[in-house]
Image (cartoon, helix red, strand yellow):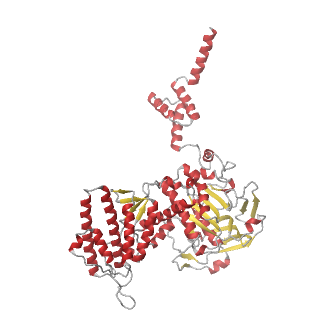
């Protein structure tokens, strides 16, 4: 299925500006459906250039003021792409009431499809609100989609191909919608979906990292994966992230774990006491060694903190995983499950320091694991931790490592957790990028999530097998970007996504950026305004000067400057023009200062002239004329 056109006839209870507008997604053709008669008008755009953005790449930008429904339109596109593909696992409740139509291809033919909500048969058989197997409430028989074949003179290359399509939706904003359907028949890398997905990364009884920390950790893992791929497939000039990740990644060993301060699950009292006692002794040795090392070299102190913080983390996860496990104390045959048993420490053990304590503890664990292999992997990680950090932040207690080292940490972490058989996704490390700006984080988020959607979802998940057209729906993708990045945004987006997967792509992007519009043909710009005739007045957007785009009434009204400046200039202009107003000398001096900082030269010159008149002072032009007349008079004599 390839979508060429759609129109929303009615949204019950809402008056959004996206209703009763023709939305054409194929620049070569312009369809229009009459909202009352449903007659279809069709014309060809002869000036449109095919494959302008590259082979098998189409781009549309949706522009308009805030509050007109651009984001809603993207989500609706996500919905009808699924519906027209006869797929139903989609968060659709807001749209089941909508009356809409679409023109699309299917099986080498062109179809007109319409959601029918007022059909007598549907009314008669309408069901009540039901809860499906996913716990999602919906009206099962509220509407149906009726389709009919239509004939128009469109390019055979559009029809003569088998298309299976899906969509990828990106949004950097939180709307706090809880998506309950899993799996879904599209790819969603929006904040809301990924944040809800992070809920699933947890242990029983809410004993895991907070959801926000999980969300952030998974975000950075996606970013590391993206950078790793980017280094392999992009040439040096297109690795934009190199400008701001040179400082490395911050690594913390102090993730949150619930301590033994509440009702335990299936845990022996002697195990609790052993852990608590060992924990106290461990921490006493920890602080004692730290105090001793404060008088030594800084590097010794930092090595010690890194090593022993990591050891402490291992101990916490071991006890957490085995003592707060969700399984009952006995198995189906009523046999006791293994519990943590280890070496009985002697007084002399405590005097030998933390490495000795830790080694004795791990090698004498009796929990059905390969103790030697676990200790070996832990020591490998310890070597990386204490020998390869770039710097230690004393105030916030984190270490900074190069990206390459952090990639190794993730591999080592997986190996250690495999041996421990950790049931949850409780990590050894938490990560963050130090000192990144909001715009830099936004840039990393956008590209890493699209990489995740294309590589981890589309390329690997069985439900997307056979997909050969991907609609990439991006909501305000360049939000927070510096103007230079906005200029490069579309070029880099096309280049990067083609490197990952050369599949046919159709980008549909909401944006306020004039740079994006200057990259597009006018037929590919979908404008939403307050009224039907609220459109761009310029003839072509491609290659247009961004100042001309911004000056168009579609972007800015009244003047091409901020309202505060406009009102301030209008105020002084009125004072200078009105003969009834006689400003004081102090006020005229203040006005002169304001005029001196105006950046627009013609406006500035005009106000200088008015100010001179008000002061009764001759203007520069008048003085020049007088001097010229004086020169002539002197020459005549």
Q: Quadrant of residue 381?
A: bottom left
Q: Residue furthest top?
A: 637
Residue 202 seen? no
Residue 146 horizontal side relative to residue 410, left or right: right
Q: Nearer the viewer, residue 477 or 402?
A: 402
Q: Quadrant of the C terminus?
A: top right
Q: Quadrant of residue 529?
A: bottom right
Image location of residue 100, percent across then percent down: 65, 67
Image location of residue 318, percent across then percent down: 35, 75
Q: Quadrant of residue 206?
A: bottom left
The mark total stands at 0
Vertical placement of 210 versus 594: above or below? below
Image location of residue 180, percent across then percent down: 51, 73
Q: Residue furthest bottom?
A: 333
Q: Quadrant of the N terminus?
A: bottom right
Q: Nearer the viewer, residue 180 or 582?
A: 180
Residue 622 seen? yes
Q: Nearer the viewer, residue 42 or 89?
A: 89
Vertical placement of 350 versus 477: above or below? below
Vertical placement of 374 versus 168: above or below? below
Residue 287 horizontal side relative to residue 439, left or right: left
- Image point (54%, 26%), residue name: 613
Residue 541 horizontal side relative to residue 571, left or right: right
């Amino acid at each position: 299925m390839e979508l060429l056109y759609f129109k929303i006839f009615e949204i019950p209870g809402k008056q959004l500006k996206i209703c009763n507008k023709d939305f054409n997604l194929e620049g070569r053709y312009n369809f229009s459906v009459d909202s009352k008669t449903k007659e279809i008008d069709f014309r060809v755009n002869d000036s449109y250039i095919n494959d302008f953005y590259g082979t098998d790449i189409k781009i549309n930008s949706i522009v308009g003021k805030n509050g007109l429904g651009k984001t809603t339109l993207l989500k609706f596109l996500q919905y009808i792409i699924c519906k027209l593909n006869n797929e139903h696992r989609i968060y659709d409740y807001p749209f089941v009431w909508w009356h809409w139509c679409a023109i699309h291809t299917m099986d080498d033919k062109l179809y007109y499809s319409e959601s029918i909500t007022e059909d007598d048969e549907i009314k008669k058989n309408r069901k009540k609100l039901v809860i499906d197997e996913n716990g999602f409430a919906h009206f099962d028989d509220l509407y149906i989609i009726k389709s009919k074949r239509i004939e128009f003179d469109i390019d055979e290359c559009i029809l003569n191909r088998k298309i299976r399509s899906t969509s990828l939706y990106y949004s950097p904003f939180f709307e706090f919608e809880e998506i309950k359907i899993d799996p879904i028949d599209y790819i969603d890398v929006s904040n809301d979906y990924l944040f809800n997905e992070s809920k699933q990364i947890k242990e029983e009884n809410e004993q895991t990292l907070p959801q926000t920390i999980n969300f952030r950790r998974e975000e950075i893992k996606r970013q590391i994966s993206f950078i790793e791929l980017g280094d392999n497939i992009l040439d040096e000039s297109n690795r934009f992230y190199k400008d701001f990740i040179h400082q490395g990644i911050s690594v913390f060993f102090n993730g949150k774990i619930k301590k033994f301060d509440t009702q335990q699950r299936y845990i022996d009292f002697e195990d609790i006491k052993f852990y608590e006692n060992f924990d106290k002794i461990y921490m006493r040795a920890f602080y004692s060694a730290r105090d001793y090392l404060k008088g030594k070299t800084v590097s010794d102190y930092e090595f010690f903190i890194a090593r022993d913080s990591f050891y402490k983390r291992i101990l916490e996860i071991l006890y957490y995983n085995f003592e707060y496990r969700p399984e009952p104390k006995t198995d189906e045959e009523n046999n006791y499950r293994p519990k943590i048993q280890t070496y009985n420490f002697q007084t002399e053990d405590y005097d030998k320091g933390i490495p000795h304590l830790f080694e004795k503890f791990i090698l004498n664990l009796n929990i059905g694991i390969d103790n030697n292999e676990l200790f070996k992997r832990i020591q490998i990680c310890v070597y990386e931790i204490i020998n390869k950090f770039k710097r230690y932040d004393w105030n916030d207690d984190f270490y900074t490592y190069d990206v390459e080292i952090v990639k190794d940490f993730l591999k080592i972490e997986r190996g250690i957790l495999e041996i421990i058989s950790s049931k949850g996704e409780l990590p050894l490390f938490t990560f963050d990028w130090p000192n990144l700006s909001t715009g830099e984080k936004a840039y990393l988020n956008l590209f890493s999530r699209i990489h995740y959607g294309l590589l981890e979802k589309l390329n690997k998940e069985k439900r997307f097998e056979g997909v050969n057209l991907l609609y990439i729906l991006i909501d305000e993708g360049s939000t927070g970007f510096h103007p230079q990045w906005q200029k490069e945004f579309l070029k880099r987006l096309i280049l990067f996504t083609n490197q990952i997967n050369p599949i046919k792509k159709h980008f549909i992007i909401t944006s306020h950026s004039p740079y994006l519009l200057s990259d597009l043909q006018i037929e590919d710009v979908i404008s939403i305004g307050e009224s039907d005739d609220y459109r761009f007045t310029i003839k072509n957007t491609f290659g247009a000067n961004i100042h001309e785009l911004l000056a168009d009434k579609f972007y800015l009204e009244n003047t091409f400057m901020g309202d505060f400046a406009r009102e301030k200039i209008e105020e002084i202009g009125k004072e200078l023009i009105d003969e009834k107003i006689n400003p004081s000398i102090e006020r005229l001096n203040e006005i002169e200062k304001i005029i001196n900082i105006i950046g627009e030269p013609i406006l500035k010159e005009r106000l200088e002239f008015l100010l001179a008149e008000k002061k009764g002072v001759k203007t520069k032009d008048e003085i020049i004329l007088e001097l010229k007349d004086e020169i002539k008079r002197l020459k005549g004599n």
